[in-house]
């Protein structure tokens, strides 16, 4: 069954820089060029909270494992740790010398990891009052564009054309050089492969352990945009945005294009977020986000909305 458009949210926060689900997919975060983060119920389009405190465009955000906190990064070079319910900053962290492009929590959300145009990756202990980073990785030769954080690894992509894997248990660094600027990296759910979106309009599938190039996916256009990709349908398909105002889906094993999803009246589809457990996918385009998913019975949707809204602030 094909995905259909289920909702469009006009975010009213300038250009949407990133769209992110929380840990269980019950709500989503949008990062705006108006320096604010907004918290939404993606199914109803209900705005739940607005977080304002950055002095520059918000580039990325992530929700904690208990959905009680948000970490966000901005062109103002800062990292802010927010309380979801009060909407207030708990901690404002400064250390980067340039725009902070990406951020992730570790598994128990005790550490935030950020990547910047200053070519560094920084780790922050958000549970204590310590304001300095607890670790700084300076190996990248260009902007750090994307991060994957697992229980014992930090994976960072860079415009220098390399993916660096920091093994925290072994204290080792592995560098796989592709040779083309990398704008986004994600890991398959089994942890065996990395997916790298590159500026030459090619997505590359790489073996996590050996660094071997397993497959390439083409057909979308990146131009000079930082366009994100994702893995969907239990690691069987790959999806990417495109500068042509559409999203493209490929079969992971075959490498063939499965479907092209046209969004509205064009505009670059640069950020996307597959639902962590379901089939829905959210896309950012200009000032809007679009929710796509499998057609479902309206009664089921209403029950789901009631459940989500009643549980949100518990």
Image: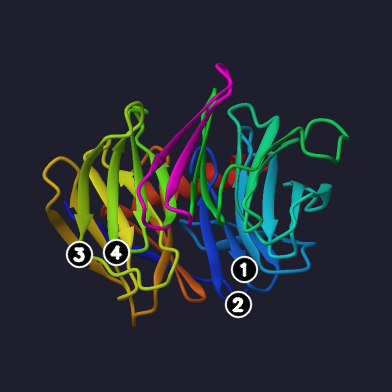
Residue at point 28% right, 48% down?
204
Q: Quadrant of residue 215?
A: top left
Q: Tell me how far mark 1 sits from mark 2, CA to CA.
A: 6 Å
Residue 225 spot, x, y in % from top left? 43, 70
Q: Position of residue 78 (x, y in %)?
A: 76, 56
Residue mark closest to the camera, 2 vs 3: 3
Helix, strand or loop at mark 3 = loop
Instruction: Residue at 59% x, 42% y: name it.
Output: 139
Residue drawn at x 21%, y 50% is 216
x and y, in percent, of residue 49 in the image: 69, 58
Q: Cα distance, mark 1 to mark 3?
A: 28 Å
Q: Which mark is residue 123?
A: none
Q: Report which residue position mark 2 lands on.
A: 14
Give the crowd class for mark 4: few <14, some 14-19, many >=20 residues within 10 Å: some
Q: What span is in magenta?
A: 159-181
- Viewer-side label of 3, 4: 4
Query: Which tag is nearer the camera, tag 4 or tag 1?
Result: 4
As helix, strand or loop, the secondary structure at mark 4 comes to loop
Q: Which residue is mark 3?
A: 219
Image coordinates of residue 102 in percent, x first then y, are 59, 52
- Residue located beneath label 4 in the image: 201
Q: Secondary structure at mark 2?
A: loop
Question: What residue did someone put label 1 on?
Answer: 32
């Amino acid at each position: 069954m094909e995905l259909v458009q289920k909702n469009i949210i006009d975010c009213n926060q300038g250009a949407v820089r990133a769209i992110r689900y929380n840990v269980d997919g019950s709500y989503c975060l949008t990062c705006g060029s108006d320096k604010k983060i907004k918290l939404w119920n993606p199914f109803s389009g209900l705005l739940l909270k607005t977080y304002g405190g950055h002095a520059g465009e918000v580039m990325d955000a992530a929700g904690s494992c208990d959905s009680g906190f948000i970490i966000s990064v901005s062109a103002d070079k800062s990292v802010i740790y927010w309380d979801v319910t009060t909407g207030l900053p708990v901690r404002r962290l400064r250390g980067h010398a340039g725009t902070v492009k990406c951020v992730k929590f570790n598994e128990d959300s005790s550490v935030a990891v950020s990547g910047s145009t200053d070519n560094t990756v920084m780790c922050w202990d958000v549970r204590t009052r310590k304001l300095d980073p607890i670790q700084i990785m300076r190996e990248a030769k260009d902007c750090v564009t994307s991060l994957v954080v697992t229980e014992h690894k930090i994976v960072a992509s860079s415009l220098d054309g390399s993916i660096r894997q920091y093994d925290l248990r072994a204290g080792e660094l592995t560098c796989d050089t592709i040779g083309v600027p990398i704008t986004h990296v994600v890991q398959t759910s089994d942890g065996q492969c990395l997916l790298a979106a590159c500026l030459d309009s090619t997505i590359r599938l790489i073996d996590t352990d050996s660094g071997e190039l397993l497959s390439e996916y083409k057909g979308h256009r990146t131009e000079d945009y930082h366009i994100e990709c994702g893995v969907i349908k239990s690691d069987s398909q790959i999806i990417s945005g495109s500068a042509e105002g559409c999203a493209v889906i490929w079969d992971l094993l075959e490498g063939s294009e499965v479907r092209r999803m046209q969004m509205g009246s064009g505009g670059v589809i640069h950020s996307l977020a597959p639902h962590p457990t379901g089939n829905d996918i959210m896309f950012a385009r200009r000032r809007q986000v679009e929710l796509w998913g499998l057609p479902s019975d309206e009664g089921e949707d209403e029950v789901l909305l009631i459940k989500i809204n009643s549980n949100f602030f518990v």
